[in-house]
Image (spheres, rainbow, N blue to C red):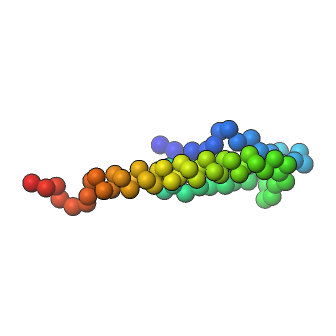
């Protein structure tokens, strides 16, 4: 299983034509969000709204994942099964 799931709708590339691009991915195991700048150390974006929206989607998914894990933890308390 892949741990990170990228936002496939994000297509934010460097405005200067270098080919650099961004990636927003959710870590399905921890709920952490990874923002990557690919192929370079910096990027100039003309449409930063795409990146902001991708981060918002990832944050919503992360919160949902955390609530699901919390609900599962309360349903399945640790320790030996009750007899």
Work out which residue is located at the far right of the displayed protein and give it. Answer: 16
Residue at 36% over, 53% down? 71
Residue at 72% over, 49% down? 51
Position of 37 compared to 60: left or right?
right
Position of 28 compared to 34: left or right?
left
Report the label total.
0
Residue 44 image offset from top left, x and y in percent: 85, 54
- In this rendering, is residue 48 above or below 9? below
Residue 61 image offset from top left, x and y in percent: 54, 48
Q: Nearer the viewer, residue 82 or 42?
A: 82
Work out which residue is located at the far top of the displayed protein and give it. Answer: 9
Q: Nearer the viewer, residue 26 or 62?
A: 62
Q: Quadrant of the C terminus?
A: bottom left
Q: Place residue 6 in its image quadrant.
A: top right
Residue at 67% over, 55% down? 35
Residue 39 image offset from top left, x and y in percent: 77, 51
Work out which residue is located at the far bottom of the displayed protein and give it. Answer: 79
Residue 21 visible, this angle: no
Residue 16 image offset from top left, x and y in percent: 90, 48
Residue 63 visible, this angle: yes
């Amino acid at each position: 299983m892949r741990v990170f799931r990228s936002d496939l709708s994000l297509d934010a590339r460097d405005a200067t034509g270098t080919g650099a691009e961004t990636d927003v991915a959710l870590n399905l195991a921890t709920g952490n969000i990874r923002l990557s700048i690919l192929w370079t150390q910096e990027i100039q974006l003309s449409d930063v709204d795409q990146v902001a929206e991708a981060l918002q989607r990832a944050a919503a998914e992360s919160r949902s994942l955390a609530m699901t894990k919390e609900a599962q933890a309360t349903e399945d308390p640790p320790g030996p099964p009750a007899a």
